Amino acid sequence: MLNLDSPPVTPFRAELNSAARCGRSFIVASLLVLMLLALVSSQAAYPQSLSASLTGEVVDQKGTGVAGARVEARNVATGSTRETVADRKGRYQLSLEPGTYMLTFSARSLESLILETVVMDANSVHRLHASLKVAASHETAVFKYDPSVAFDLKEESVKMQDGVTIRDVNYVGYSPQHGRIKAYLIEPGGKGSFAGVLFFHWYGNPNGNRDQFLDEAISLAKQGTVSLLIQGYFPWTVPPVAANTDRQRVIDETIEVRRALDLLLSRPQVDRQRIGYVGHDYGAMYGAITAGVDKRVKAYVLIAGIGSFSNWSLDYWLKAIPAADKEAYRAALKSIDPMTQIAFASPATLLFQFANSDEHIAKALAIAFFDAASRPKQVRWYDGKHELNVEAARDDRREWLTRQLSLTKRIRS
């Protein structure tokens, strides 16, 4: 009797059942393979971040941990930064993405340590200990002068342009070697109070003289600003020659900047609480020194400056002198260098402007100059070379001065 519910298993049906089981196994295996491939693909699309760990201690020359030391890591390729503060024993730790970094270790009263090319490999621990020296003394006494010395201001010519008065003037320099300082005095129409801005030009061409910022000063006058644009002496008129001679020349030129501030502030319509400074190249360097020793300026714009006079003196004028003389030059200038003095600029506000393709300033040196400065500060980068003849840079500093000095609303042409 046949059981219709349970038909007999024939050889043919057994073969079919076996094939079905094999088919199911194949499907399951295929699904597993597909799932594995999907997982691998997902990991490829979203790679795991293998960070590197930077750890170590910041100590002084005696080997004592420096509590509160600041450690900053700047990615050379991207410009992004990470920072931390050392604990009470000087210990620190930073988690970083793989790459090449410029590391800056800094602390109050100690000289910053900058390591320009530290390579951080993926998924590794780098132990780096930093020893900080006592900072160079903050020299201010050498920049003292007698503010009562008369200017004997003389006017060569005067003209009006769009309601702005442009005076071509000269006055007695503080140093006898400087003779009479040529300058432009730019004044808006009407009565004050007005903001005041001192402009100091660059060394290069074109307009490596007081003419460089004339158009910008006229524009600022229309916003209620009195500007003084001075002509430089060192190294424009005389070149670098030797350590002690150039040290004194830098001091003398800085005193001329301070005297120029005296002249600007002597104009009765100028508001002493709203003083700015704009300098390019060497003009920026003298501005950085002034920021450390003279507290009358509220806001500085420092364009394509560098932290040490030695960099340019030794690279361009004194390249052939012996190594010992080069070291003596650096030592003589160090305590008065822009890099040293800019650390004491506070409470002044600083805006640094640099070119991405500067042929005279390596990016690491520009960053080091900015890092050495006191806060508050900002830095902006532009496509261009050292002359930074870029409209965006001009617009940025004008807008920045408008905010910092509370100028009237900008009039766009």
Image (tube, grey):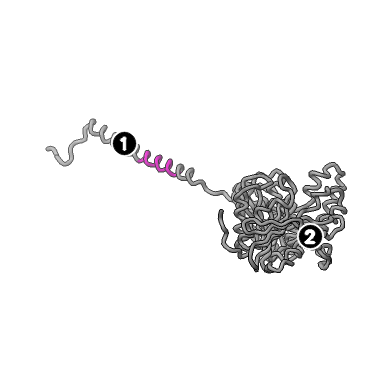
Which residue is outermost to the top? 12
Could you say whether the residue bearing mark 1 is in a helix, strand or loop?
helix
Report the mark closest to the observer, 1 or 2. 2
Could you say whether the residue bearing mark 2 is in a helix, strand or loop?
strand
- Give the residue displayed 81% in from the left and 46% down from the top: 314
Which amino acid does the dot numbered 1 rest on? Gly
Which amino acid does the dot numbered 2 rest on? Lys
Q: Is residue 120 visible?
A: no
Residue interval drawn in magenta? 28-39
Crowding at label 1, few (<14), some or many (≥20) Cα neighbours within 10 Å?
A: few
Q: Which residue is mark 2?
A: 154
Whether residue 35 appears in magenta in the rendering, the answer is yes
Task: State the residue in front, 137 or 31.
Answer: 137
- Give the residue displayed 66% in from the left and 65% down from the top: 195
Q: Earlier in the sequence, mark 1 or mark 2?
A: 1
Task: State the residue in front, 273 or 59.
Answer: 273
In the rendered structure, the answer to whether residue 29 lies left or right of residue 43 reads: left
Q: Position of residue 391 (x, y in %)?
A: 60, 49
Q: Position of residue 315 (x, y in %)?
A: 79, 44
Q: Which residue is mark 1?
A: 23
- Give the residue displayed 87% in from the left and 53% down from the top: 245
Quarter of the image for residue 11 reads: top left
Total marks shown come to 2
Find the distance from the CA under tag 1 to the CA under tag 2: 105 Å
Whether residue 100 appears in magenta in the rendering, the answer is no
Task: State the residue in front, 73 or 205.
Answer: 205
Crowding at label 2, few (<14), some or many (≥20) Cα neighbours within 10 Å?
A: some
Q: Position of residue 176 (x, y in %)?
A: 87, 57
Q: Is residue 41 visible?
A: yes
Q: Position of residue 122 (x, y in %)?
A: 60, 47
Quarter of the image for residue 37 reads: top left
